[in-house]
Amino acid sequence: MWNWLRYWPDQRLFLPLILCAVATFTTACTGLNQAAFSSLKAAYQGPNRNFDAVPRNSAYQYMQVEVPGAASLTVLGYQYPSLQVWYAAKGEVVRLQGNRLLDTTGLNVNLANVQYTRGSQAQQTVMRFDVPELGLFNVQATLQLQPTAPPKSNLAKQASAAKGLYWYSETFDRFTGNTVPAALKGLPPAVYGFAQALPEGTPASELPLAVYGKQCLAPTYCLEWHRQ
């Protein structure tokens, strides 16, 4: 499952991250030490991928990530006001803007050139994105935030069991031209599990960090994550 998710961020901003990913087995990496890398490697290569049994370094934050047919344990490498960079032992990287996925590479289906902006209403977000594998470019859609039932996946159940969560979804309310691209028909909504209920009227641009998230890149291809 190696290379299931890889992203090489902007070299100027993330040069230390790139060097750490390349020099996995050195002790000079900024932000992560050998113990963190060793635990990630053990989880990543374990015969049963039993992440719960992997020794954790209390100095770091972990996030389990799953896509169809693959799973990995990632650690928080860098954090900025609206961006978190999570990565695993061999350099696989997940970038989240708040709770939403940014560009991905190395997957069977990838998001690219993703931009999120405020919608015309408080609980709406405008998303512009490409899905190259589906032949989709410069797609623009409005996302609508609303309460929802919890997902039925094992990772969602695991997240909910560890901490009672409040569930919200972001559905594609409308696409530019009011036409859903054929490749995205039936696309499930994004789902987030928060530690606390959102106050009524909370703007979609001001959401707290979720414990769990799920975002689908195609109707049958979704990426899930659980901050632990």
Image (tube, helix red, strand yellow):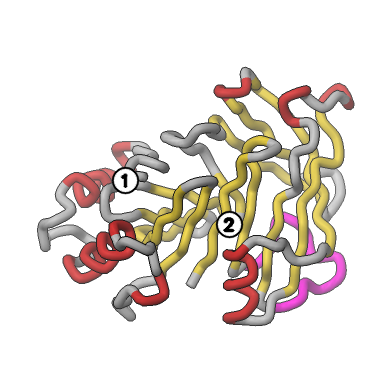
Q: Does dot 2 land on a helix, a strand or a loop?
A: loop
On screen, residue 199 above or below 74: below
The rendered magenta stretch, by its main secondary structure, is classed as: loop
- The stretch in magenta equals 196-209
Residue 158 occupies which quadrant of the picture? Answer: bottom right
Which numbered marker is on residue 14? 1
Viewer-side residue, 108 vs 177: 108
Q: Does dot 1 land on a helix, a strand or a loop?
A: helix
- Residue 113 shows in the view: yes
Residue 34 occupies which quadrant of the picture? Answer: bottom left
What is the three-letter code of the residue carrying label 1? Phe
Q: Is residue 141 left or right of residue 62?
A: right
The verdict on residue 205 being magenta is: yes
Q: Residues within 10 Å of mark 2 (few under 14, many from 20)?
A: some
Which quadrant would the N terminus be assigned to in this image? top left
On the image, the x and y values in percent for residue 101 come to: 57, 47
What is the three-letter code of the residue carrying label 2? Gly
Viewer-side residue, 15 vs 227: 227
Query: Which residue bears the numbered disc 2?
Result: 98
Viewer-side residue, 187 vs 93: 187
Which numbered marker is on residue 92? none
